[in-house]
Amino acid sequence: MEEDYYLKQRRYDGARARLRRLEREFSEIKALTTEATTGAERLFRDAKRVGLIASEVVSQDTQHLRELLASAAAPRPRDYAETDSGVDMSDLEEKRRDLRASLQEVRDELNDYNRLEREADDFSREANEQSARLASIGLLRSTDAQTHACPLCDSELPVAVPKVDAIAASLARIGNQLSTARRDAPRIQAHVLKLEERRGAIDSQLKAVQQEIGDRIAANERLRVEQDLFTEQAHIAGRISYYLENAQAVWTCNGFVPVTYLIMPPWLRTRAG
């Protein structure tokens, strides 16, 4: 009787020890499964964030999650263009500098001609006024000597009055200068018009170059964003591939159980598999 009790007690203690060991193994498998599932869900969220998986896709179960991750980790062709080389941008910037220098030269020349036109107009106005004042020269009496008497009213003046011939010569000289100014006016205006046309052409070229530079900068920025996104996608895809390579499905006698686990110790993997 005592021997039979002792044998039963030993079998009971052994069974309890095996049960505890199985419970520990189950707890470890459960913890690893939870960790693996959490890692898979985290990778799933990252893949959606970088566009490897459509944002509206929802994981239905663990097997579906694995399929989605496998699809996200599949190799993808690079579908973005290369950025413009620094040489192209340097050429455009040099062209812009040359156009700005040419535009400034034309503006300076236009300012000079506009100033010349204003001075010519001022001279013409003053010359016309002077001519009007001296138009009465024909009414003055001719005299060979200077006198202090006014030629119009004979009143005494503090300074001597020039001779009529001298006044007439001054009037003629002013008339010649006025004629020259009037003769040069059309030529100056024509040249100013050519300068205006040249300024407009250079300004249009400069705007086109500036627009091209702006477009290149914007395109390069978009390409940089796309390249950064592609790099992040490749990083996430690599993490997913590593996860899938080191995660295995747990099988039981009842068939496939939708559970995954990370790298397990050999003794635990043997019992779990």
Image (cartoon, rainbow, N blue to C red):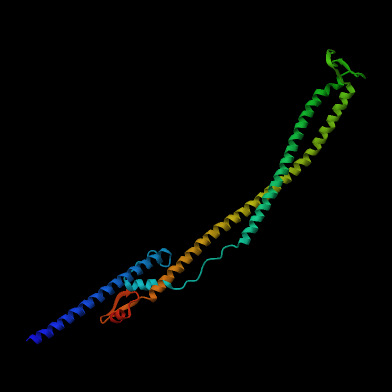
Q: How many marks?
A: 0
x then y, percent, for residue 229: 47, 64
Q: Quadrant of the N terminus?
A: bottom left
Q: Is residue 149 left or right of residue 231?
A: right
Position of residue 257 in the picture relative to residue 239 (left or right) = left
Q: State left or right for residue 25 relative to residue 97.
A: left
Q: Is residue 100 above or below residue 29?
A: above
Task: Name the residue nearer the viewer: 134 or 105.
Answer: 105
| Picture residue at 45% right of the left edge, 68% below the top | 235
Residue ID at (38%, 68%): 43
Residue 12 showing in the rendered view: yes
Where residue 77 sits: x, y (%)?
50, 71
Q: Which residue occupies the foreground of this view, 267 or 223?
A: 267
Q: Position of residue 105 (x, y in %)?
A: 71, 47
Q: Position of residue 176 (x, y in %)?
A: 85, 32
Q: Residue at x 20, y 79 (%)?
A: 17
Q: Is residue 70 visible?
A: no
Instruction: Report which quarter residue 58 is drawn in.
Output: bottom left
Instruction: Name the residue furthest left.
Output: 1
Query: From this viewpoint, which residue is outermost toward the right?
Result: 144
| Left or right for 157, reference 40 | right
The relative height of residue 31 versus residue 188 in the rendered view (above or below) is below
Q: Quadrant of the C terminus?
A: bottom left
